Image: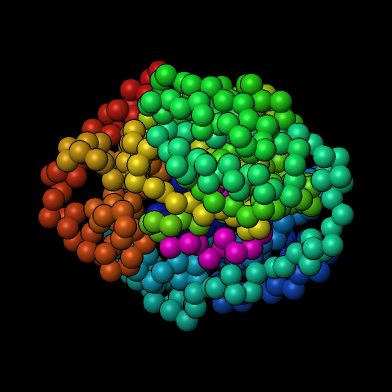
Amino acid sequence: MIFNYLKYISPVWYFNLKPKVDFSYFPTYEQLNIAGIKLEYDDKYISDEAKNRDLAYRAFQLGYISIKKEASGGINIWKKTKLPRQDEFRFLRKNFNPLWVFYVLAIRLLGLNNPFREIHGFLTSRDAFRERYNQKHLDQPDLNSFDSSLLKSNPRVSVIIPTLNRYKYLKDVFRDLEKQTYKNFEVIVVDQTDPFDKSVYEDWELDIKFWYQNEKALWKARNAAINSSKGDYILLYDDDSLVESDWIEKHLVALDYFNADLSSGVSISAVGAKVPAHYSYFRWSDQLDTGNVLVRKEIFTKIGLFDTKFEKQRMGDGEFGLRAYLSGYRNISNPLAKRIHLKVGQGGLRQMGSWDGWRPKKFFGPRPVPSILYLFRKYYGNSAARWALLKNVPASIVPYQFKGNKVFIVLGIFISILIVPIVSVQVIFSWYKSSSILKN
């Protein structure tokens, strides 16, 4: 973990875990100089180790990406090290909302750590200002003139779409795909709609392959489609989304330019959370959204398909993305391959689950969805899973449409205190269910 106190705020971040291959995710000062990137140390840190880690983290967040796949030798952030408390709090102040800094201080004090040293570290870091990475991110000026050999080779792409009771929106998806500037692709639809209507797939200028799947199962559908695909690249997509005409092309060019294995397009949601600022520029991706990602098909051969233990639950895409990262595959966040995610209220996964994995549909339903704890506990361990619960459960008390609203998050914290017995039952139930999944 790059800074120790990060475990309280981001306990289940991809980069807390060391991958099979380190593509210099967190570069040294020398590597940045060689790349022509001028970033200076923050001399307000006490320790040299903190200065190095802060510089590497800033480079990561600004969008530093080593183009060469063999690039390695960056800062080893996975090496355990003890840093001064002032440095720990300085890092938090530079990267998170002040409310989270107070949150960490409260945890440290309640954890019976030396109160004088914790408060001293908190107070002496007050001169740190929040970084705004999106306002000064690194550009990729050569990308506009990049002559993509991958694009010229015209590889076959398989666009995979599971659908459930969304024919109206699926037709809009087909219209967008008909307009694509890149033409060498097939469309594979696994239809779970009742009643099934074969005529939906007629009269399109597309290479469409479809079949009806009786069981309402998302990951089973995607796995079956991948197995039947003919493409060298798999483009995973949703049935309630809109894209521009150069969507497939932008995915392929980015994959080629960055010598990457996965291109994670950004998803701009019509409902729910605010669009993250880092969606506006290229960076290493710390997530995978199966509604908009291009993947080399060989990856599925090497590390396996989607884990069906997530069926009718949440985070199956997150687990695959984490597995790909740990296996040494490069995943790029691609702002040019964007989609509008409508998140319509009918059909799809929402019909089988909830809008959000942390908000149960039933009053005494598990909070969060058990598959989320299964993922956290399997890869990060029980301790990190507990920190994730402490951070996310209070905020999940507020309705989904107010997700990301700071006022409502604070309100949710106070409400959760009042209904502790109910929330505790929900969390214990989820932990128990996740234990059953782990035992299998």
Taking 335 as reference, is 406 above or below it? below
Classify residue 426 by image quadrant.
top left
- Along the line of sight, which residue is nearer the eye, 320 or 155? 155
Q: Is residue 311 magenta?
A: no
Q: Residue at x 34, y 46 (%)?
A: 345
Q: Position of residue 317 (x, y in %)?
A: 51, 37
Classify residue 28 by image quadrant.
bottom right
Taking 400 as reference, is 171 above or below it? above
Q: Residue at x 38, y 71 (%)?
A: 98
Residue segment shown in magenta:
274-289
The answer to whether residue 311 is seen in the rendering is no
- Along the line of sight, which residue is nearer the eye, 289 or 373? 289
**In this rendering, would 245 be left or right of 161?**
right
Q: Position of residue 410 (x, y in %)?
A: 26, 65
**In this rendering, would 292 be left or right of 37?**
left
Q: Magenta-highlighted stretch: main secondary structure?
A: loop
The answer to whether residue 248 is seen in the rendering is yes
**In this rendering, would 49 be left or right of 252?**
left
Q: Residue at x 22, y 36 (%)?
A: 365
Taking 183 as reference, is 148 above or below it? below
- Along the line of sight, which residue is nearer the eye, 75 or 118? 75
